[in-house]
Image (spheres, rainbow, N blue to C red):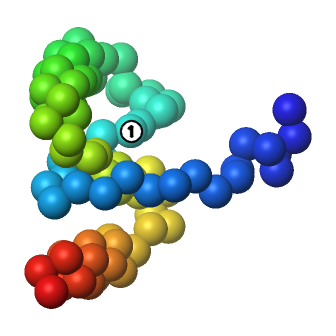
Amino acid sequence: MSRFNVLCRTPLPMSKKVLLLVDVINPLNFVTASQLVPEAFTAARSIAKLKARLSKQGVCAIYANDNYGTASFATSFRLVARFREKEAK
């Protein structure tokens, strides 16, 4: 499959409430990562249950991740705030 097929635009879901998940995706590719695995699995299971419960209520999930220090969360949060302002009108 070509990269262009994978990166096609998809419609964004709309919801008045969102589950904002910050820094929950991590490849655990560092020396001491094995020490975190049990707690990481516990957290992942809890997040999955919460996401499933909220999804049934029509709540969308937003993932904000910055494993490599390249994302600007300030920009991301400004976008969320701008969206909320438009929703309020």
Position in image of residue 85 (x %, y %): 18, 84
Callout 1 environment at 10 Å: few (<14), some (14 to 19), or many (20+)? few
Q: Splitting the image into 4 quarters, where does residue 39 fall?
A: top left
Asked whether, in this view, residue 27 is left or right of residue 19, the answer is: right
Comparing 82 with 38, the one in front is 82
Residue at 17%, 21% in the rendered image: 49
Nearest the viewer among 1 and 11 is 11
Q: Residue at x 58, y 52 (%)?
A: 10
Residue 42: quadrant of the picture: top left
| Residue 1 falls left or right of residue 14 | right
Q: Which residue is drawn at 27% across and 47% down?
A: 60
Disc 1 residue type (three-letter): Ile
Name the residue at the front extreme.
89
Quarter of the image with the N terminus is: top right
Q: Is residue 81 visible?
A: no
Toward the viewer: 36 or 4?
A: 4
The answer to whether 47 is drawn above or below residue 81 in the figure is above
Is residue 19 something that shows in the picture?
A: yes
Q: Residue farthest to the right?
A: 2
Secondary structure of residue under mark 1: loop
- Indicate whether 54 appears above or below 64: above
Position above or below: 65 against 55: below
Can you identify the residue that label 1 sits on? 25
